[in-house]
Structure formats: C-alpha cells, structure tokens
Amino acid sequence: MKTETKTALVTGGGSGLGYAIAKAFTEAGIQTVIAGRELEKLEKAAFTLGPLCSYRVCDVTHFAALPQLVNDIEAGIGPIDILVNNAGINLKKEFTEVTEEEFTHLLNTNVTAVFVLSREVVKKMLERGKGCIIHISSMAAIYGMPKVIAYTASKAAIDGMTRAMSVELSPLGIRVNAIAPGFIYSDMTAKALDADPDRKARVMARTPMGKMGQPEDIGAAALYLASDAASYVTGVVLPVDGGNSSSY
Ligand code: NDP
C-alpha cells in the first residue's frame, strides 16, 4: 500500500475506533493528526502513537472554528489527503424521553460537523484534484434498534451523505466511503452494552462470528479504504461486523 507521503486527519482519534485508525495509519507511514476535545487524552494517544502522530484540540460542533483547523493543519503539517470523520456520540434513551436539545446536539456532532469539516477539507482537496474521505456509520443505519432514535437518524444520514458526496466528488478525484462497524469494543459500546446484558445477548445472537470486533478491525478497514488498493472504490458503506448486518 503506497501511503508513505500522505497526511490524514482523524477526528476522535484519541480513543476507541479513532485511535485504532490512527494506529493503523501511523504504522503504515501516514502522518496522522488526531483531533478531539480532551487535551490529556490526545497527548497520551499521540505520545503512544509516536512521531508520525500529532494532535489538535477541537470540538467539532464549534463549526466556525473548523476552517481554521483545516488551514492550520495544511500550513503546519501538510495537505490533508485523508479525512476520517470518526468523532461521534451516542444517546441511549426511551423515544419519548429524548429532548429536542439532546436530539439536536447529537445531530450536530454526528452529522452537521461531518458536513462542515468535509466541506472545508474538500475545498482544499479540489485544488489538488485528489483526496479520500471516510465516514463512520453503524448497524443502526441498517436495521431498527430501540432507544437510539437520534443516533439512528444520524447514522442513516451518514449513509446518504456518503453516496451523495461520492457521486458529486468522485468525478473530481475525491473518493468518499464509509465503514459500518458492527459491535466493537470501545468506551461507547461499554456504556451501551455492559449495563444491559439482554441487549448484549441479542447482539451476540445475531452476530454469526459469535464475538464482538476489535478496534483494530476498523483500523485495518480504514487503512484499506485510504490506500491506493481501494483506488476504484467509492460510494461504499462497508460493514465490518462479523456478519451482523447480513444475519437474521
Ligand atoms: P468513543 O466514545 O470511544 O470515541 C469517540 C471519540 O469522539 C472520542 O475520542 C471523543 O473525544 C470524540 N468526540 C466526541 N464528541 C466530539 C466533539 N464534539 N468534538 C471532537 N471530538 C469528539 O467511541 P467509539 O470509538 O466507539 O466511536 C467512534 C465512532 O464509531 C463513532 O462515530 C461511533 O458512532 C462509531 N461506531 C462505533 C461502534 C462501536 O461498536 N464502538 C459501532 C458503530 C459505530 P473527546 O471526548 O476527547 O472529544
């Protein structure tokens, strides 16, 4: 995989799946900037990931600051060849208990921020006539799950945006794909599943491989989509799920 000279921005790269993606990228020689809200988390992750990793503190819902983030990375580190829109939040709550504020905040984080950051990065990629964008979707976009209404709306939007962006941008040299992780070990799934053994049993029962995935499984998929090995792949939402989405 010819990835040596590339620069990537991975939002939410300080933990969970984003960290695993940043690890796969740096191990492949990609200069990787991780971004998130918590300085300490980023410092620790960047230290562990080594000299090819740097970080920027940013809240992706502060939309007005995102153009500056992109300019700063391009000026200080290099042209962003790969953008991974990984930062995301979940909200597990009864449908009737979800407030407009909670719904909007989740959509702002999981959808609007993805749009705004992609738009700013795409402006730069268009000048160069190349680039690669990877979104992170979810099983929630594929089948109905109870008590995650805002999250489901957000990830279904990501699938639609993946296709719409791909059809508009791939003729201009920018590939746009998504990964739909199944149930992968992370802080997010620990919160959602550990306190709900019935839900966890249900997840396992419909996962043919009979186990949860590891963050590294998502790192490997992101590295593939980011690499020249996927140079003819665009508009795809790739399940990495132990067969969960094709099960009954
Ligand atoms: P984590 O909670 O472990 O990580 C989420 C990351 O996003 C954190 O590093 C967090 O950093 C960052 N983040 C959250 N909000 C913001 C914000 N406003 N601005 C900047 N950064 C933010 O979750 P996962 O690793 O599990 O999830 C990563 C992605 O994968 C999400 O999009 C999630 O929906 C998706 N996903 C995960 C699955 C799983 O099984 N784990 C399954 C399907 C999809 P900080 O707190 O420092 O801001």
Image (cartoon, rainbow, N blue to C red):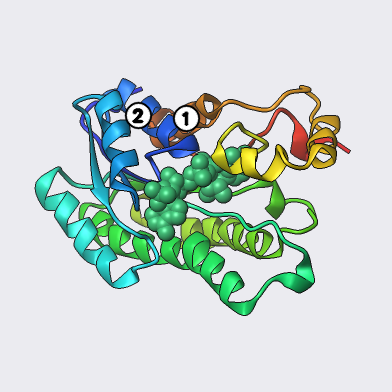
In the structure shown, which secondary structural element does the residue marked by tag 1 occupy? helix
* Residue 168 rendering spot, x and y as whole percentages: 45, 63
User: Compared with residue 188, is residue 95 higher up or lower down, i.e. above or below?
Assistant: below
Dot 1 corresponds to which residue? 219
Front residue of 235/16: it is 16
Assess mark 2: CB under 8 A from ligand 1? Answer: no
165 or 75: nearer the viewer: 75
First along the sequence among labels 1 and 2: 2
Where disc 2 sits, the SS reads helix
Residue 146: image location, x then y, percent: 80, 56
- Relative side of 154 to 120, left or right: right
Residue 122 lies, in percent from the top left, at: 31, 59
The residue that label 2 is drawn on is 25
Q: Are marks 1 and 2 in contact (CB under 8 Å)?
A: yes
Q: Residues within 10 Å of mark 1 (few under 14, many from 20)?
A: some
Quadrant into which the N terminus falls: top left
Q: Is residue 165 visible?
A: yes
Left or right, 119 with reference to 187: left
What residue is shown at x 39% (from left), y 26% (from top)?
Answer: 24
To which quarter of the image does residue 207 belong?
top right
Q: Residues within 10 Å of mark 2 (few under 14, many from 20)?
A: many
92 sits left or right of 172 in the view = right
Which residue occupies 21% across, 52% down?
A: 128
Residue at the right extreme, as displayed: 248
Q: Is residue 22 above or below residue 167?
A: above
Q: Amino acid at mark 1?
A: Gly
Q: Residue at x 40, y 36 (%)?
A: 226
Tell me the amino acid under the disc marked 2.
Answer: Phe
The image position of residue 105, as x and y in percent, is 52, 69
Numbered label tally: 2
Dot label at residue 34: none
Residue at position x 60%, y 62% from top?
Answer: 154
